[in-house]
Image (cartoon, helix red, strand yellow):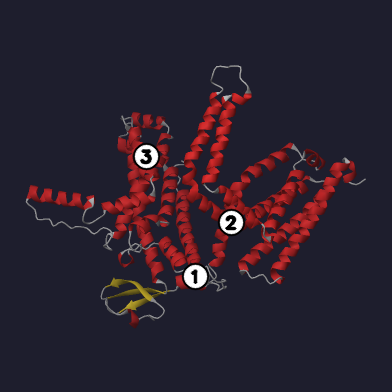
Amino acid sequence: MTAYSQVDPKTNLVLRIHFFWRILFAILAAAGAVYIWVGGMETALWQKILISVALAMASIFSAIGAVQISRRNHSGRMISLVLDYLAFVVCLVLMLNTGEIFIGIDAFAETFPKGIPYLGITVVGYFLSTMDEYLPQKKQTSENSLKVVGRWVMLAGFAIFLLQVDAINGIIYFLGKLVQPMGIASVIGAVIFSISIWSMMRDNVSQALHAKTDHEQVINGWLFLSPNLLGFLIFFAGPLILSFYFSFTDSDAFNTPNWIGFENYAKILNVRFAWLSTPDQFAREVVDIKVYDEVGRFLIGDGGILFAAADKFFWLALRNTLVFVLFAVPLSVIPALVLSNVLNSKLPGMKFYRAIYFMPSIAAVVGISLVWQWLYNATVGYINYFITVGIEFWNNLFNLAVVDPKIQWVSDEKTALLSIIIIAAWQTMGFNTVLFLAGLQNIPGELYEAATVDGAGAWDKFWSITLPMLAPTTFYVVSTTTIQAMQVFEQVFILMNPAEGPNNSTITLVLYLYRSGFQNFQQGYASAIAWVLFIVIFGITLVQFQRQRQSSIYES
């Protein structure tokens, strides 16, 4: 007796259809993978590899699913649901793209303000429909009840809204675009895959394939997880892998990228150190200036060492980034630790000050940078104004002759990076304060009480109890702050003009990555910079992990 003969005829027929559908799906997927390479498709190599691998895997799993369905195994149902769901999503995206729905969304955003007042009519209709429940009950027909009137008002308001935003023409345009081979194929595919999913989810089919309660829970769990999971794979993991491939090519975002191996990385890491006989010796006398540019020189006695690189801007960006991290991280962590101890006290008004210090962390970076740009103004900025007032006060009070420096905060290469450090530290300090505050509130009060009994002072409690017990919080704060500082971009890009600052004093790795990829269209080289930045961040974080692991203060 076969597996199909043990179920009712209708379910038996459905299972046979699914079996042949899985075979057909496997054949079509395999044919598509072959056609990509022999059909003369003009597309990039990475796209051919990606699509052919996806189709080959779909073909293999579909064949496995057919075998499992024939054996009436539930794994065949799981494979069918996964493959059909993914294929449905692909068809849906193709359908929306063919219908130019994304362009339509932009057009809808432009006309949406015209329809806002008519959405108000819809809201009024909703309230009218709800008022019927709160009014005294009277004998009235459904035709004259407030609920019916409210529904008609809602419908009329929404219809007028659609007319005002020109949605009718947009829908007609969308449907007109779908009358293309790709659009028709995507619509048919979406319908077929949705029917297959619906059929597999029916009770008689699931019972015939020995589905259990935990199987249904797994399916529902993955179904709810799928939007975030697909978003992660498509918009994060996918571009991450793609950028790694691009880092080995000469991609310029327009032409088909060519594989060049480690050439991008070789250019980044191509550096040379040369001895200088005198501090002012010309670089061309010790290095080939056609290949290398001077990055800096280290003076030692009457001579020195010249540091040259094939790409000096990368090393300047790395230097500025590391200097930024070296100052911004302590300035945003140490004051946060002090503030958290103050805010953890029982003084009145502490909750208000907690909110005040946290506000910069949630404020928009653009707004903050523009405000600080005005504060840094050398002529009318408040920072220089208070410096001038303070110097005049001390000169008059002590009969001094201190000269007002009139600091050019963002136009002087000596202070440009410092101005960025101050903004970043000020903005990050509030968030770190909240993290430290949470850690402080988890420290058992009995430890402080015991220390008080033993005669420990405030400093002894802080040094021997607070700091060791805050070790995990401190590790997290320092690690996340360092990672964030290594990726500094927004403040530099908005505050400085040009963004690189005077004499490239504020060029950072992410800024240089952006300039290489989106201004110079060297996306292959920019991808290599991104991966080098990742290695640097990973190395710093790994060192912090090792130091945290070696420290046994908290554990003991």
The label on residue 215 is none
Asked if the residue under mark 1 is in contact with the one under mark 3, i.e. CB atoms within 8 Å, the reply is no
The label on residue 464 is 3
From the viewer's perspective, tell me whether residue 249 is left or right of residue 276. right
How crowded pointer 1 is (Cα within 10 Å; few <14, some 14-19, many 20+) is rated as: some
Residue at the farthest bottom position:
285
Amino acid of disc 1: Tyr
105 or 43, nearer to the observer: 105
**Rendered location of residue 483, percent (x, y):** 44, 53
**Rendered location of residue 550, percent (x, y):** 46, 50
Q: Quadrant of residue 143?
A: top right
Q: Residue at x 55, y 64 (%)?
A: 244
How crowded pointer 2 is (Cα within 10 Å; few <14, some 14-19, many 20+) is rated as: some
Say which residue label 2 marks.
Answer: 100
Amino acid of disc 2: Glu
Q: Residue at x 41, y 72 (%)?
A: 311
Quadrant into which the N terminus falls: top right
439 or 375, nearer to the observer: 375
**Rendered location of residue 481, percent (x, y):** 41, 50
Say if 127 sits above or below 537 in the image.
above
Distance of mark 2 from mark 3, alpha carbons? 64 Å
Asked if the residue under mark 3 is in contact with the one under mark 2, i.e. CB atoms within 8 Å, the reply is no
Q: Quadrant of residue 419?
A: bottom left
Query: Does label 1 or label 2 sit earlier along the sequence?
Result: 2
Residue at the farthest left position:
399
54 or 194, nearer to the observer: 194
